[in-house]
Amino acid sequence: MKGPHGPERPAPLRAVVLTMSDRCLRGETVDTAGPAVARILEGRLSAAVAPIEILPDERAALSRRLIEVCDGGLADFVAVVGGTGFSPRDVTPEAVRDVAERLTPGLDEAMRAESLKKTPRAMLSRCVSGIRRQTLLVSLPGSERSAVENLEAILPALAHGIAKLQGDPADCGPPRGGGAAQPRAKGPFVLGICGYSGSGKSTLIEGLVPVFRGLDLRVAVVKHDAHAPSVDAPGKDSDRFFRAGADVWLRSPGENFSRRHGPGEDLGACLARLERDYDVILVEGHKDAPLPSKIWLRAEDGGDPPASAGLFLDCLGRGVDRQKRVLEIFEAWKFGIAVR
């Protein structure tokens, strides 16, 4: 779908979650890890997740299902939850290796390294991942907490990895302070950062700007209400010229200001003009504007967006790493994974 100020968005990432558990299959316990993984994929990668499937702890059964999903082109990403430990019926790693055409050990290393920060028992994990055709397969531990921790560890790289499987020609090496990031999509990344007064909009934007600038991206910020500012104090030369009827430009070695007569420019016209010169446009406020993507920030005492404001990618409280979430949205957009 093409937004009013953004590029045409591709179809969402298709994901399948398979839970390996004899006990869940018999109804002796409830699967909580699979649904937790599905929620993260839906909320953080905007994935379209198929209904969770519960399989027995059998190597052949899992291998058959993985072949059906991959060879049938049914999913871009498969998470296999459970069966990665030392128990006799923990056969998930063997089944993944049976069907994978290429292994992806970097993902396995990242997951174990993250878990080792929490417990030395993480070294007992046998999680493996790999690629079959154009599908990425990842095995995760069976406990909800461990599955979430492992998935969180690799989430920042998943969008790019899946995009590469789908034919993205972009360089795998992300810029490291000097090179320019090159979004695959045409046009700038536009994100509305909305919330009531005191929700932390300005603080978030202030922290994001140097991150994007460190990627050598040109950044513009549009504020929701300029409060009728004056560029110069009353009585100064520029103010006298403006009041006499001229449009005034103030220039100095490090910055430029302009003060022009006429009706205020509406948001759509402002964004259309900025899109020619900027790679990232952060829009503070404008909660009711039809922006291609918006997030909502809750204040200390809560506060959800009004119904009139439309859809938001996420509602973020104070306890969430907001900057990390915005950068995840940016990475998904840059590498062609649809964001809702």
Image (cartoon, helix red, strand yellow):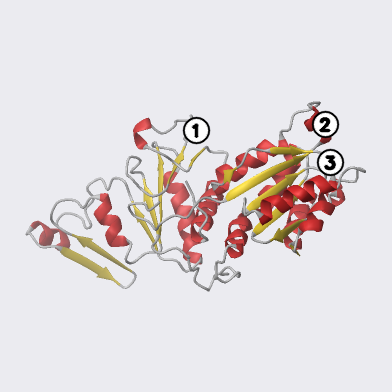
Q: Residue furthest top?
A: 28
Residue denoted by label 3? 57
Mark 3 vs mark 2, CA separation in Å: 9 Å
Which picture quadrant has residue 218?
bottom left
Q: Residue at x 45, y 58 (%)?
A: 209
Amino acid at the residue labelled 3: Asp
Task: Specify few, some or many for label 2: CA neighbours under 10 Å numbering under 14, 14-19, or 20 or more.
Answer: some
Mark 2 vs mark 1: give the one in front. 2
Q: Residue at x 36, y 48 (%)?
A: 291
Task: Specify few, some or many for label 3: CA neighbours under 10 Å numbering under 14, 14-19, or 20 or more.
Answer: many
State the image coordinates of residue 157 (x, y, percent, origin top left).
63, 58
Of labels 2 and 1, earlier in sequence is 2
| Residues at discs 3 and 2 in contact (Cβ within 8 Å) | no
State the image coordinates of residue 313 (x, y, percent, origin top left).
47, 43
Residue denoted by label 2? 23
Amino acid at the residue labelled 1: Glu
Q: Secondary structure at mark 1?
A: loop
Of labels 3 and 2, earlier in sequence is 2
Of labels 3 and 1, earlier in sequence is 3
Mark 2 vs mark 1, CA separation in Å: 42 Å
